[in-house]
Image: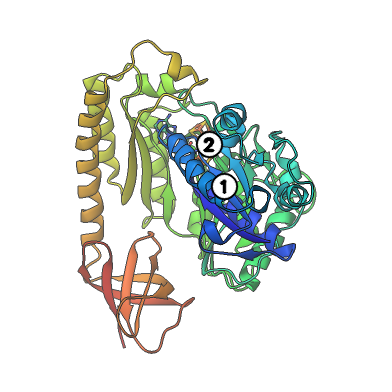
Amino acid sequence: MRFFIKSYGCQMNSYDSQRMSDAFIAAGGEAVSKPEEADVVVLNTCSIRDKVDEKVFSDLGRLKIIKDEKSPNDFIIIVAGCMAQLRSKDILKRAPYVDAILGPQNIGQISEVATDIAKNKALDAIVSISSDAREKFLQPASASNRSVSEFLTIQEGCDNFCAYCIVPYTRGREFSRSVADIVAEAKNLVAAGAKEITLLGQNVNSYRGEGLNGGKSNLANLLYELANVAGLKRLRYLTSNPKDVNERIAEAHRDIEILAPFLHLPAQSGSDGILKKMNRKYSNSEYLEKIEMLREHRPDIAFSSDFIVGFPGETDEDFQQTLKLAEKVRYAQAYSFKYSPRPGTPAARMDDQISESVKSERLRILQDLLNNQQTEFNENFVGRSLKVLLVKSGKHKNQLTGRSEYSQAVSVCANNISIGDIAEVKITENASHSLIGVIEP
Ligand code: SAH
Ligand code: SF4
Ligand code: F3S
């Protein structure tokens, strides 16, 4: 079967697309680069903010045209992922030609479902949206020919129920894979060419998978275990909820050489009142204390963050607190979003929703500040060295591009280095989209 998969969401969503691709390939399938060339198209959807949903419906409209041109039974359309989980009825109503709907925990069935549809022509749509994550990891991922940098989901779901967030409703309850399972997958990825692995989960600091000797493990222990995987050159993990960051993690950053000194620690807001309404379970000062503690253990650590502006009830004063927090931390990089009400979440029902124009204005101010911090962070490396993992060829002859430990894009020209190497690069210039450097003799 020729297949085409489109991802709309976060890194976990991309990882799920990779697993679906593995399942098709294991069953003899072949990836194609355009939907028109495929026998089966999978839209792996996201629901974190509005707008993405409408994009899915417009993409479905285009797929319908292709389906009508071909014989409908020879062009299978499957909607998978977080929006599929939440809106299966809507999708089938607005796009009755969709052949199957799979939630994020049901994507393991993709290849069988596609084969069933191809065999039993013109059946009703198949809908599989249970939210039990265990099933998903029963089949080991069959990694072949992977890129230098790969994702590995260690934990599914989320039990935090932040007031704005849809994820606990799409991915269900928290579930941690066992250490043995994760280490085996990491070894497979490395054997298939990966040099850097980013561990994924919505709240990886509450990882509690079964340890190698029974009992429950934790994230720090898992990191020490993965540090022993031969051939693995760099390790990262996403996402940490600040409330669960502890000294064990800081020690792991101190002890583990391949663990990047870079942490995505989403603050969301700097106002205690808003953090409380968001149900984040940490205060402004607790967040700053954790940053301090991490810096004590690993002085060269840098931070990235996510922020939401215009959460219901956010006053100018609250917003100023967010700006002050960012000024104190000095981020290497950060994402910021306008609050987007998600149906079914507590925040969507709160009274004091903020107007679109205020949200836009606050977003602009915050993004200006964060962009300046990022530029300043990057400028600081001109004249200094960075360890760069080379990921792919660059635009010019003999040029390779890669990522620093801080995830900065870095380009370098040299004859004696290859993709997959970590090179010590002296930065000579901070260009608009990447740093440029040389390898010192
Ligand atoms: N588990 C991660 C975040 C997952 S969602 C954490 O706890 O930090 C990624 C980011 O999207 C969040 O950090 C948040 O900043 C943003 N986000 C989530 N829901 C949102 C909403 N309803 N409106 C705007 N941004 C949202
Ligand atoms: Fe959403 Fe909060 Fe869970 Fe992150 S920790 S996925 S923001 S509920
Ligand atoms: Fe989107 Fe689901 Fe990820 S809602 S952000 S794809 S967990």
In this view, the residue in front, 412 or 297, is 412
Question: Spatial distance from mark 1 to mark 2, Cα to Cα?
Answer: 51 Å
Specify the farthest residue to the top. Answer: 351
Using the image, determine if residue 68 lies above or below residue 147.
Answer: above
Q: Position of residue 308 (x, y in %)?
A: 35, 32
Q: Quadrant of the C terminus?
A: bottom left
Left or right relative to 229: residue 46? left
Left or right relative to 184: residue 190? left
Q: Tally the marks.
A: 2
Local crowd size for mark 2, using a 10 Å CA cut-off: few (<14), some (14–19), many (≥20): some
Quadrant hosting residue 335: top left
Task: Judge: label 2 CB < 8 Å from ligand 2.
Answer: no
Quadrant hosting residue 383: bottom left
Q: Which mark is residue 412?
A: none
**Residue under pointer 2:** 244
Identify the residue shown where x is 54% and y is 44%. 64
Quarter, ligand 1: top left
**Residue under pointer 1:** 68
* Disc 2 element: helix
Quadrant hosting residue 324: top left
Left or right relative to 247: residue 141? right
Q: Is the residue under label 2 in contact with that under label 1 (CB below 8 Å)?
A: no
Q: Quadrant of the N terminus?
A: bottom right
Hey, what amino acid is under mark 1?
Asp
Identify the residue shown where x is 76% and y is 43%. 135
Hey, what amino acid is under mark 2?
Asp
Q: Position of residue 97 (x, y in %)?
A: 61, 39
Q: Position of residue 213 (x, y in %)?
A: 79, 52
* Disc 1 element: helix
Residue 12, can we see it? no
Residue 407, can we see it? yes
In this view, the residue in front, 287 or 241, is 241
